[in-house]
Amino acid sequence: AQTVTQSQPEMSVQEAETVTLSCTYDTSESDYYLFWYKQPPSRQMILVIRQEAYKQQNATENRFSVNFQKAAKSFSLKISDSQLGDAAMYFCAYFTGTASKLTFGTGTRLQVTL
Amino acid sequence: GAVVSQHPSWVICKSGTSVKIECRSLDFQATTMFWYRQFPKQSLMLMATSNEGSKATYEQGVEKDKFLINHASLTLSTLTVTSAHPEDSSFYICSARDSKPGVYEQYFGPGTRLTVT
């Protein structure tokens, strides 16, 4: 079974600084997708970024980028120029067509301080 | 962008009664919808996967007779919590996947807070 591990329950970053959230996963599949979701206090899940496993290039969305290391089964999220609005729970998620459902990690709570 | 709505956003019901939660995809068709439960400060726990026009697939440990799921159209899925008890109090989130081939993102509703008294 696929598992997703987020080893950092909480992280803190100062405004305008950079922070990296870690995620590792376990799978025997070769074709899959990885996602980072943000859940702010409103509890609305928001897709931050996605990565297709067959793509070697790391995905980037404005201030958000990933470091995808397929051999190491690692998928970290880097947030640059952190803003107060980035404070939220961040969930790493894995998807494969075989299971056809998302597997979520336990989440990392990000605090952004002034 | 793809929008998923949920109704109601918050519901209080008495123990023993049933409550229905609706999930709608507003600007896309969703062959597959998902229902999650989330406890405070925890991750999302998948309860069941519903496919339009067929029976839902429940995750291990989820009582299918208690949590009735109906996916009658490509834009609507409902979750009915039957004979609710206080331990059913939780945050329920639905999600929908676009039916377009090759699209794998799931779009999430804003969630429903259920309180059973």
Image: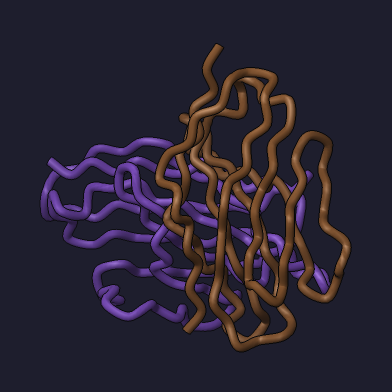
Q: Is residue A30 above or below residue B41?
A: below
Q: Is residue B117 left or right of residue B54?
A: left
**Rendering quarter of residue A30:** bottom right
A11 relative to B30, above or below: above
Q: Camera-side residue: A21 or B67?
A: A21
* Residue with the most extreme front position: A72
**Which residue is more in the foreground, B96 or A62?**
A62
Q: Position of residue B98 (x, y in %)?
A: 73, 64
Give me the residue at 42% from left, 56% from top.
A106
Q: Residue at x 28, y 59 (%)?
A: B81
Quarter-of-image position of residue B46:
bottom left
Please state if A12 lies on the left or on the right of A96 as rendered. Answer: left
In percent of width and height, residue A46 lies at 63, 43
Q: Colour of chain A?
A: brown
Q: Quadrant of the N terminus of chain B?
A: top right
Is A53 above or below relative to A35? below
Q: Is residue B69 left or right of residue A54?
A: left
| Number of dots carrying numbers | 0
**Chain letter for the purple part:** B
Residue A82 in the image: x percent, y percent? 67, 25
- Residue at 66% x, 21% y is A83
Q: Residue furthest top?
A: A114
- Where is residue B38 shown, x and y percent of the image? 36, 51
Identify the colour scheme used: by chain
Quick one: quadrant of the C terminus of chain B?
Answer: top left
Q: Is residue A78 above or below residue B76?
A: above
The residue positioned 62% from the left and 43% from the top of the image is: A20
